[in-house]
């Protein structure tokens, strides 16, 4: 025997048989639109600096990043126990809400076409920063501060870094 509640939830067909109730579900919209648009994402300058520094170093013909002075201080800092190489050396950025601008200081290897290296650095940095952050890169300024001659000794020789 069915309870009164069960009978009320069923509808009677034309033949007198009870049919199960039709379940209708209301779509409840919560929040306010697409979940991807709820809230803000901020990206620190240091994040963009690291991405740009790594992307610039990947280009053939880039010997180092930063000016001679910053590389010298960096080499000393890298030798301190627990210290790590700074991938942000030679990189300065300004990050806005949707755009960023970068200044890079590089040292190129002797014999490379500087204009070609600069173009490759610019393209690689823009691609990496835009892909990883979603920010629009409005400009990448490149200053070539030095050229590494074949007979010059590195400021950071591998044999000394132990």
Image: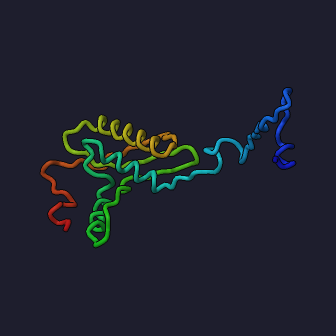
Please identify the quarter of the rendering in which residue 82 is found: bottom left
Q: Nearer the viewer, residue 154 or 3?
A: 3
Residue 107 position in % (x across, y down): 28, 49
Please identify the quarter of the rendering in which residue 84 is found: bottom left
Q: Is residue 120 left or right of residue 24?
A: left
Residue 105 position in % (x across, y down): 35, 49
The quarter of the image holding the C terminus is bottom left
Residue reaching furthest to the top: 14
Residue 28 position in % (x across, y down): 75, 43
Q: How is the image coloured?
A: rainbow
Q: Nearer the viewer, residue 5 or 134?
A: 5
Residue at x 85% of width, y 43% of height = 7
The total number of labels drawn is 0
Q: Is residue 15 left or right of residue 96?
A: right
Residue 145 position in % (x across, y down): 31, 49
Residue reaching furthest to the bottom: 81
Q: Nearer the viewer, residue 61 or 8?
A: 8
Residue at x 45% of width, y 51% of height = 48
Residue at x 82% of width, y 39% of height = 10
Residue reaching furthest to the left: 151
Residue at x 42% of width, y 52% of height = 49
Q: Is residue 115 left or right of residue 12?
A: left
Q: Is residue 100 left or right of residue 25?
A: left
């Amino acid at each position: 025997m069915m309870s009164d509640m069960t009978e009320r939830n069923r509808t009677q067909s034309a033949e007198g048989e009870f049919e199960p109730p039709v379940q209708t579900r209301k779509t409840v919209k919560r929040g306010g639109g697409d979940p991807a648009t709820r809230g803000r994402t901020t990206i620190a300058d240091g994040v963009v600096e690291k991405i740009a520094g790594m992307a610039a170093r990947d280009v053939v013909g880039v010997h180092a990043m930063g000016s001679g002075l910053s590389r010298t201080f960096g080499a000393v800092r890298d030798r301190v126990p627990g210290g790590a190489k700074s991938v942000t050396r030679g990189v300065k950025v300004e990050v806005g809400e949707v755009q960023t601008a970068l200044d890079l200081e590089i040292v190129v290897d002797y014999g490379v076409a500087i204009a070609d290296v600069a173009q490759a650095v610019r393209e690689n940095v823009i691609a990496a920063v835009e892909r990883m952050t979603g920010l629009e890169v409005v400009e990448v300024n490149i200053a070539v501060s030095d050229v590494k001659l074949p007979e010059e000794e590195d400021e950071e020789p591998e044999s000394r870094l132990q």
